[in-house]
Image (tube, rainbow, N blue to C red):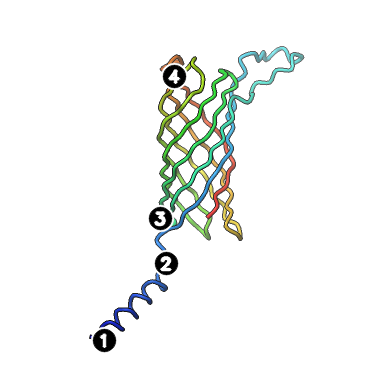
């Protein structure tokens, strides 16, 4: 019986220290911006100082999550959105599911879907749902900080807008810390 116990402990220790870990926790954050068409732009009047493209919205997001075997990650996120054209402040809270399509040397090309609730502090607009889909690159560094470059499609369910939603495409720069 003593030999079986020693063999069991030896096998358990070898298994514990020799296998690759199943996953790891991380912290993430990003800053996104959306560009829009300037409604006041006139192509023949170049003296008015109005450009064709103008900033339309800024988004800031932070979250915590867990990555499984460097392929799939889940996260819980929150953020702040401000749409200049409509004076809409929004606070999305959502869950995210990220899948690394291609990986090479800890760099990754990924896709991410998001779903959650969007809170608005204004009584002009009610709370609604939040949906998102994006593609991005995660560029590994020599330490535990990674740079993220992404493009995202956002849909915010807001009554009072056309089709009761506000859609936007954003470009972002962020980080992840493992």
State the separation of the CA atoms marked 1 and 3: 37 Å
Percent from the top left, x then y, of residue 45?
72, 12
Q: Which residue is mark 1?
A: 2
Q: Is residue 26 left or right of residue 3?
A: right
Q: Which residue is mark 4?
A: 126
Q: Which residue is mark 3?
A: 68
Along the line of sight, the residue nearer the viewer: 117 or 101: 117
Residue at x 46% of width, y 26% of height: 119
Direction left: furthest residue = 1
Percent from the top left, x then y, of residue 177?
55, 52
Q: Say which label, 3 or 2, has the lower sequence index.
A: 2
Give residue 132's mark.
none
Q: Nearer the viewer, mark 4 or mark 3?
A: 4
State the separation of the CA atoms marked 3 and 2: 11 Å
Q: Say which label, 2 or 1, has the lower sequence index.
A: 1
Q: Say which label, 2 or 4, has the lower sequence index.
A: 2
Q: Which residue is mark 2?
A: 20
- Mark 2 and mark 1 residues within 8 Å of each other at the beta carbon: no
Q: Element at badge 3?
A: strand
Percent from the top left, x then y, of residue 41?
65, 15
Q: Is residue 16 left or right of residue 138?
A: left
Binning the other alpha carbons within 10 Å of mark 3 as few (below 14), some (14 to 19) or many (20 upward) gives some
């Amino acid at each position: 019986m003593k030999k079986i116990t020693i063999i069991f402990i030896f096998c358990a220790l070898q298994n514990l220290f020799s296998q690759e870990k199943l996953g790891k926790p991380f912290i993430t954050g990003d800053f996104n911006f959306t560009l829009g068409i300037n409604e006041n732009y006139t192509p023949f009047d170049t003296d008015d100082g109005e450009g064709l493209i103008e900033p339309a919205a800024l988004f800031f997001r932070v979250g915590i999550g867990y990555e499984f075997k460097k392929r799939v990650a889940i996260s819980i996120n929150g953020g702040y959105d401000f749409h200049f054209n409509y004076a809409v402040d929004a606070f999305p809270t959502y869950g995210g599911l990220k899948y690394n399509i291609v990986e090479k040397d800890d760099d990754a090309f990924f896709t991410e879907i998001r779903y959650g609730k969007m809170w608005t502090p204004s009584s002009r607009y009610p709370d609604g749902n939040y949906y998102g889909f994006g593609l991005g690159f995660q560029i590994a560094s020599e330490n535990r900080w990674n740079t993220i470059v992404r493009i995202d499609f956002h849909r915010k369910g807001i009554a009072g807008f056309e089709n009761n939603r506000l859609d936007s495409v954003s470009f972002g720069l962020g980080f992840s810390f493992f």
